[in-house]
Image: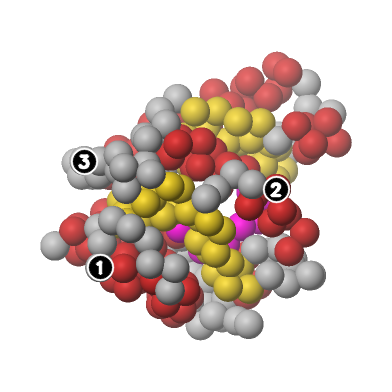
């Protein structure tokens, strides 16, 4: 299964999520790439869209490889397996985490652009991204979401590696993945158009959803 772009993936994912009939849902999309996907899911569910800002902590010298993540609400998690494999010293980790926290604060300001978070207390919170790779960002998003006391936390993505789903499934009340390839490579490999979502598009789509 391949997707033309994030919007097409979101429409297909929206149909799948709606099939499970979430009660009083709110979609929380991970910026930036998860927002166009989440917008379509929110349309399918006829519910509001919010953003859940999380920042990956990259391995020094190889920033695309996550050694952890930070999120709104002063949440921080570590990818202990990668840290051990790469022999990351505690001081190097803390330095990378501090940089991620600075970037997180900046992104919260840009992506929210004055928009208040939606109260999810007692509602079904559906976390949406354009795909899963290492899962560090999603785990941070799940942890910060639990602190907001929703009735349930769901995670919905168009594509994720089959090998990593068992541990992720244990963290949420429902996991929805459209495509689970054995040979994953990268999230972008399953999209014909994986053009980067712009900063301006994020709050624009959130505002359009809430209207």
Contact (CB < 8 A) between labels 3 and 1? no
**Is disc 3 placed on a helix, strand or loop?**
loop
Place of residue 210 in the rendered image (x, y in percent of width and height, measured from the top left): 18, 59
**Residue ranking furthest to the top:** 91
Place of residue 63 in the rendered image (x, y in percent of width and height, measured from the top left): 66, 43
Determine which residue is flagged by label 1.
46
Contact (CB < 8 A) between labels 3 and 2? no
**Is disc 2 placed on a helix, strand or loop?**
helix
Query: Which stretch is magenta?
Result: 128-135
Cα gap from disc 1 to disc 2, whole angstroms? 30 Å
Q: Which mark is residue 17?
A: none
Magenta stretch: includes residue 173: no
Task: Tell me the quadrant of the picture where the C terminus can be found.
Answer: bottom left
Q: Main secondary structure of the magenta part?
A: loop
Characterize the local packing of mark 2: few (<14), some (14-19) or many (20 or more) Cα atoms within 10 angstroms. Answer: few
Q: Would residue 18 be found to the left or right of residue 182 on screen?
A: left
In this view of the protein, which residue sits in the foreground, 2 or 44?
44
The earlier-in-sequence mark between 3 and 1 is 1
Place of residue 73 in the rendered image (x, y in percent of width and height, measured from the top left): 40, 28
Magenta stretch: includes residue 130: yes
In the rendered view, would you say 18 is above or below 175?
below
Please report the residue visible at 71 percent of the width from the left and 53 percent of the height from the top. 166
Q: Which mark is residue 116?
A: 3
Place of residue 101 in the rendered image (x, y in percent of width and height, measured from the top left): 48, 28
In the rendered view, would you say 25 is above or below 79?
below
Please report the residue visible at 65 percent of the width from the left and 63 percent of the height from the top. 160
Please report the residue visible at 67 percent of the width from the left and 42 percent of the height from the top. 66
The earlier-in-sequence mark between 1 and 2 is 1
Cα gap from disc 3 to disc 1, whole angstroms? 19 Å
**Is disc 1 placed on a helix, strand or loop?**
loop
Characterize the local packing of mark 3: few (<14), some (14-19) or many (20 or more) Cα atoms within 10 angstroms. Answer: few
Q: Which mark is residue 167?
A: 2
């Amino acid at each position: 299964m391949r997707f033309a772009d994030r919007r097409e993936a979101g429409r297909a994912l929206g149909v799948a999520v709606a099939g499970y009939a979430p009660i009083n849902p709110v979609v929380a999309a991970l910026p930036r790439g998860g927002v166009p996907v989440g917008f379509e899911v929110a349309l399918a569910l006829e519910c509001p869209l919010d953003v859940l800002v999380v920042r990956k902590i990259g391995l020094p010298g190889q920033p695309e490889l996550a050694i952890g993540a930070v999120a709104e609400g002063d949440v921080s998690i570590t990818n202990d397996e990668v840290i051990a494999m790469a022999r990351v010293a505690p001081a190097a980790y803390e330095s990378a985490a501090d940089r991620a926290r600075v970037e997180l604060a900046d992104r919260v300001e840009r992506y929210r652009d004055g928009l208040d978070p939606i109260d999810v207390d007692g509602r079904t919170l559906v976390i949406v991204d354009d795909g899963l790779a290492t899962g560090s960002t999603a785990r941070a998003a799940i942890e910060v979401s639990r602190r907001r006391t929703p009735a349930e936390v769901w995670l919905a993505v168009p594509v994720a590696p089959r090998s990593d789903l068992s541990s992720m499934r244990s963290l949420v009340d429902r996991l929805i993945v459209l495509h689970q390839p054995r040979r994953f490579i990268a999230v972008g490999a399953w999209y014909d158009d994986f053009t980067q979502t712009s900063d301006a598009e994020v709050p624009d789509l959130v505002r359009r959803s809430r209207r």
